[in-house]
Amino acid sequence: MQFQVSNDLIEQVRHLIKTEGDKELREMLSEIHFADVAEVLSELNLTEATYLVKLLESEKTSEALMELEEDFRERILENLSAKEIAEELEEMDTDDAADVVAELPDQLAEEVIAEIEDEKHAEDIKELLSYGEDTAGGLMAKELVRVKETWTIAGCVREMRRQAKNVTRVHSIYVVDKEDKLKGRLSLKDLLTAPAKAHISDVYIPKVDYVNVDTEGEEVARVMQKYDLEAIPVVDHEGVLVGRVTIDDIVDFIKDEAEKDYQLAAGISQDVEADDSVWELTRARLPWLVLGLFGGLGSVFIMESFDVALAKYKELFFFTPLIAAMAGNVGVQSSAIIVQGLANDNVKGSLLNRLIKEIGLSLISGVTLGVLVILFGLLDGMDLLFSFTIAISMLCVIIVAALIGTFVPIILDKRGIDPAIATGPFITTSNDIFGIFLFFYIAKLILGF
Amino acid sequence: MQFQVSNDLIEQVRHLIKTEGDKELREMLSEIHFADVAEVLSELNLTEATYLVKLLESEKTSEALMELEEDFRERILENLSAKEIAEELEEMDTDDAADVVAELPDQLAEEVIAEIEDEKHAEDIKELLSYGEDTAGGLMAKELVRVKETWTIAGCVREMRRQAKNVTRVHSIYVVDKEDKLKGRLSLKDLLTAPAKAHISDVYIPKVDYVNVDTEGEEVARVMQKYDLEAIPVVDHEGVLVGRVTIDDIVDFIKDEAEKDYQLAAGISQDVEADDSVWELTRARLPWLVLGLFGGLGSVFIMESFDVALAKYKELFFFTPLIAAMAGNVGVQSSAIIVQGLANDNVKGSLLNRLIKEIGLSLISGVTLGVLVILFGLLDGMDLLFSFTIAISMLCVIIVAALIGTFVPIILDKRGIDPAIATGPFITTSNDIFGIFLFFYIAKLILGF
């Protein structure tokens, strides 16, 4: 790429802020892309960043603000007046503006909306705020190009020039009837190639994919990916065209979803980042550790109840971390594959087939690992029956762990609960307890203590 | 959405294939979207799917084939002749066609390319195959609209109508000089609003983001996301415009990357899916389980070396699964946050600050969990000194686990190794061993056995 935000540039900006070199600052930053302005802002401290946001044109800072980390943006906005925030919002697309307003305290949000001069813009923002955050209504923007089916191509081009000013990117032109109900779409390509006097009704494509205002974000993402769409129109319950969702909002959505699943699998319960405060990180992490602790204390109880075995088979107790690790690892593997399969909609076939498959899978792994344990036992001079006991109970633990890892997410999913919560610490902890109990129980059956 | 692939439809298609109702099949499927045709194909068995691909127009099946799982597509293509595959490729965009050819055995790939009638298309495919899979060159398509800076707007519109036929979606019009070097871009909006007699050189935007053919896919994804681009032009080392990458290819890339990290964290070493064969799944899972097994055997050795403690402090051994679980959970949490932070480029500040932060974080968690252990000890009637020993050694284990989880990925990243491999089983296994050793060592220092 041509442009890089260098440390030199940051230092220069810092110096100019300190010496209030407003004119130089404006000149220096006027030529650079808003995404780079955002990068500069994120390198500054709060006072410096606020100074810069107040100084530069809202046209540039509004877009830069949207690129910042949510926390940092919120703290900058806290330093602005309702009027100053409103000026930023005027320059934003309605979907971004609504996201920003949603982050503000209720009282301030109302003041800010009242300060927005463009009444239509303010109305649009209020409308967007009324939809659920993760629905098509919450993701969409009001900006789009709409034409009536009765217009001519020439009239349409005229009208488009007017509307296009407010629309950053024209993906599709949506065709509506006189009641504003969505009828179809017109591509820019069609517009370029149709005769000027033709009517829209003669050339538009009546087949158009759309979603409803209350369609879940996940479903919007699925449809847009399945049909390779870059924008999808959103209609209300009467079929009236109310907005459109663009692919860039969906990219963020897909990424956020993937990150959330990843964090759940790693035992982090809130959306945190490496640079969040120690308190925020602790709040996200500690609950899962407490869960793990209770699981561990459960294992202590189980072993206490089997402690008659200590006299003759103390080595059994040395193997408990191995058994717990196996149960945990197998469980996490199985659950991760199923959770991902459920998310991508490619878990097919009957539950019985899946059961047979998981058992087959764990038999192969379990027998391989069992042979390794027996080999280890021979090298370590363990009793052969004892080695067999370990290998066989490990095999059983692996089978049960795979089944728990597979079926807990499937059951959660069938009940409408996000299966991703059943990955990571949840599955490792429950598998630790089940695994250790099963291990001792089977050992007792074979060795008879 | 309006259309749903129903079981009825699938059954009807199956029946028509069996009875060779070719005409009805063609009629029935002519109206539905290629993504839905893909869904129908994926519900059929290989013979049925092959029958359908051979029967329907390449125009429809070529796009449907691209939506199928890679394995299934490969198996269908194995049943087609080189000529039939070439017909499918003729209808595909160059980037998709190159991906398909790359999946074919070398011999067949050459035959297929030789069978492609459109020589330019065949040349383009061969060119794309010459780039690395995960580079801009490997991701890009040759289809784009290019205009010369010396043309007029009217000439440009004429030329665009011709070029646009081969381009599914016009994102931007790229402006080149007489040597085909990238000069800038023109938006469709500009084209609609500029006077017909103006020259391109008067109205085009000379600032344009671009990437080089050998830019890594990850970097392309980063740039496109940072600057909110829907397409980015790709140039060769002389600055000549050679192709463009569109956001839909990048969406897949982002998703694949996220899935790969997720799978690594879950201990799955290859890109597998829930419906892959038992052998494929075993190959992806077993190596990590073997790693876990060696870790567990390591713990056995450690405990054997501390077995003098058994006589007086047998309860220590009951706590090993708890210690291992804590070390593992804390390590996975720390590494997941760092790996994600590294991927999103928001791990900032000095290593010392991060060290202090991780220690602070683990102190808070460790002390909280330690208090819970002491409470448990009181309820369970454990000796107070013994409870303290457990709590304090657990605290140390948590701190060390957090540091390993944080710094191993950072070190790997600095050395240019994907830090995602240091999550999941890797970190849990090493932390299990370190944790259990540390636990017994500290217990020995305090209790003196």
Image (cartoon, coloured by chain):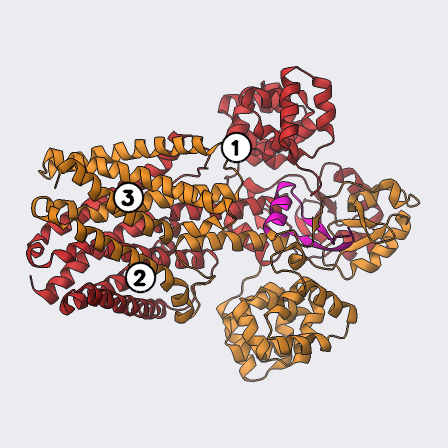
Chain colours: A red, B orange
Can you see residue A115? no
* Side of A371 relative to B386 (left or right): right
Q: Which residues are magenta?
A: B218-247
Q: Which residue is mark 3?
A: B326
Image quadrant where one finds the N terminus of chain A: top right
Give residue B265's position: percent from left, percent from top. Answer: 41, 52
Give residue A32's position: percent from left, percent from top. Answer: 71, 33
Crowding at dot 3, Cα within 10 Å, few <14 / some 14-19 / many 20+, comes out as: many
Callouts 1 and 3 on one subunit: no
User: Residue at 64% across / 33% down in the picture?
Assistant: A6
Between marks 2 and 3 in the image, the one whose residue lies nearer the viewer: 3
SS category of the residue bearing label 1: helix
- Looking at the picture, does residue A371 appear above or below residue B359? below
Query: Marks 1/2: CA distance?
Result: 39 Å
Give residue A445's position: percent from left, percent from top. Answer: 11, 65
Query: Marks 2/3: CA distance?
Result: 22 Å
